[in-house]
Structures are given as C-alpha cells and as structure tokens.
Amino acid sequence: MTIVLVVHDTPLPALDGMIAGEIAAERGARFTTLVTGGGGHGRFDCHIHVLAHGEMAPNGVFWAERAIDGPVAAPVDRGAVVRLDDACVVVPINPHLPIQAEAARRIAATAAAAGRAVETLVVTERDGVFELRDEGGDTVLGAWRLDEFGRPFRLDMEPAPVTSPALTIVVVGDEALMREVYPANIAALGDAAEALGLNLSLRFVDPRDEPAPVWEHALAEADGLLLPGGSDMEQVRGQTEAARFAIRRDLPTVGLCLGMQTMTTAVAQEICGFNDANLAEADPSAQTKTFVRLHDMQGRPMHRLGIQPCRIEPGTRLAALVDGAATLDIHYNHRFVLEPELQKRLSDSGLSVSGWQAERNLADAIEVPGLRFFIGMQGHPELASRRGRPHPLIAGFLKAASGA
C-alpha cells in the first residue's frame, strides 16, 4: 500500500483537500481525511460537509466526493491510516493547522515502521494557479485553476466560454463565505448553468449589511433568487424579506435548508397574513412559529444527518423535476422542521408540501404552485450536484429563471 500525502497550506476551508481529491480520482485511490481535519480553521462553519453515513467533515471533502463521484468514508485517526488495506490511500494535509503537520510526521513514522511506502506531494498557489510537485522537486505534476463558480479544472481542460446573454442570479449571503468556506452552492449553480448552456452572472447580497438591503432595489435586475442554508440566525430576517419581495414580483426562487425555512416563513407573512411568524430558532418568543425543534418518535430532540430518502409528493412541480421518482436521496443536516399544525393553514393559502420525510408526515420540501418557481428543500441538494449531472432542483430553477 502506498500512502500519498497531499500537502496544501491554506487558510481557506473551501480549498482544504481540494487538490487531494483530484489526485485520488486520477489514481483511483481511496481518499481519507483525518479526524483532526478542518476544525482548526477557527470558523464554526468550516466543518459542516455532510457525509453519507451521518457525520460532518471538513468542507473541502465536498471536492473529493465530486472528483471521485462517490461518498467519502468517515475520517480516520492518524494512527489507523497505515492499517487501511487499499492499494493507494490519499490523505490531505494542511500545515496551516499545526495538528495536521504533526499528523503528517506521525503517519510517515508509523508507515516506515510498517514497511509502507509514503509519497509526499506539495500544492503551491501562484497567480490563481494551484501547482502540484513532488516534495523538494521542481517539476510540475499538475496545475489547476478555479472557474468563476469556484470549481477546479486542469489548465489543459479549460472550459469553453459561454456567450449567451447573462442570466443574473442573486444569492442572499456573504460572498466570501460562499467562495472561501462553503463552496457547494455556487458550484451547483455552475454545474446547472454549464449543462444548460447559460451564461450565469452571480450577485451576492449580504442580509447582515448595515444599512439593511432594500430588496426592491437589490432584486430589481435579478432573474432568480437563491436562499442558501446555514445556521446563522442573523440571515433569517433578510432572507425572509427577500423571499417576500420575490413572491410579490413572482421571481423564481429556490431555498436550500435554512432557505426553505425562510421562504416558508415569507409565505406565512406575505400570503397568510401572519406578520409575527418566524422560526423558533430565530425568535423563540414568536407567537406563530413556522419551524420548531425536530423530535424523534420517542419525543427526544434529534439532529437529522446524512443521506436519507425524501418522499416526493406525486403531481407536484418537484415530482416533475425528478421525472416522477417516488423518492430522492438528499443530504440532511438540520434540527428544525415545519410546524405540522401550521401546514393546513399554509396549504389553504397556496403552499404545497412536495416532499416528506421517508417514514413520517413531516415536510421535507415545499412549493407554491401559483408562482413561476418557488420551491425549497429542507436538505442540501447542492451537495449531490456534479459537473455534467446537475441536481434537478437547481437545473429546474435556472430553467425557470431563464424563461424556459
């Protein structure tokens, strides 16, 4: 067995392990992260990538799963790496985190004692290009650049430019967060735009800005609105206000996880007239709580994690997007759920539940059929998007935004 350490010193969680994933795919090797990975970046949202089995990992693992087109297994302790029996194991090492630099030394030592070969490759960044070399060598073994959607590509495989008229999508959130910490949302938009031949222009509006965004102006030239996920409750008010304006203007809108929660809350406020409606997590004192704590069948609070099936409601717009599939596997990472007692009142005002938890009548997706495109999913479909195979929800959103 050969252990390949891919060393990339980077302070950006979105890049942590990215090139290592590319190398694992090219070599047909096992990609494994260490239990020490990611968390040392000092940002609470740098270790929230959802693994299939129900565990969170460094955000850069997202790129490895895209590259190998399959799930990455649970992180491995540094002392257990040499016991993996795969012919080749690729391990990302980020010396920006001192604990990872120490892990690399320990892996090398234990591998030597076990008679295992270790190959060390080093990634350097220069003028926006990521170059890969043998440790101490001068020969460039590979070079990558990021496209406008943050997706890596080899320099000898640069994508052709799209010359169609620009389609403007407003993403409600901090651009630095999307590009440097959690890259999945814009990568998924890039996948869908590429597959549809669309020239996509992204605008980011941070709802936490002071003064607060005026959504009538911020969305005046927009063709579509994306409300991303996250656990920052400071995002909620701005996302909800943006969704309310989108309802008035009938602007195609997609919501992911927290985004589904805020767009549902916007329906409760804008269409149902519940002006006090809010997420219990954002406002525990709200009289009308749209999303409340999720509990298991025994009444215990639960955190829903991993890839799980979403039961698709037949006859809905979402069902049409997934070609009538009965279920759809989705990445989940949430602790709150649409208040069941509120569902009927929302339904009477035009909101439909288009997806359910597999074995419970709890909402996993919503839509407003009377609008051009207004669909949200409680999970993270963006994590299942691939170049050449975009997620149907994201592709459907861009089609609607383009007028198709």
Image: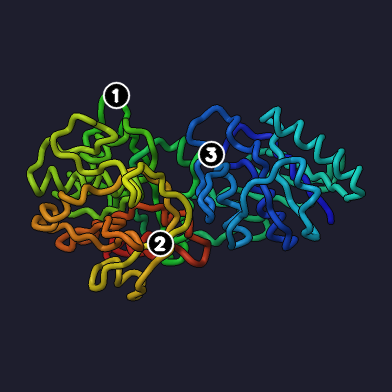
* Residue with the most extreme bottom position: 324
Label 3 Cα neighbours within 10 Å, binned few <14 / some 14-19 / many ≥20: many
- Residue at figure coordinates x 27%, y 53% from the top left: 253
Left/right of residue 380 with respect to residue 280 in the rendered view: right
**Residue type at mark 3?**
His
Q: Nearer the viewer, mark 1 or mark 3?
A: 3
For mark 1, what is the residue?
210
Of residues 32 and 55, the one nearer the viewer is 55
Q: Position of residue 264 (x, y in %)?
A: 22, 48
For mark 3, what is the residue?
47
Left/right of residue 299 with respect to residue 192 in the rendered view: left
- SS category of the residue bearing label 1: loop
- Residue at figure coordinates x 41%, y 58% from the top left: 199
For mark 2, what is the residue?
198
Q: Is residue 102 above or below residue 305?
A: above
Q: Position of residue 96 (x, y in %)?
A: 67, 30
Q: Nearer the viewer, mark 2 or mark 3?
A: 3
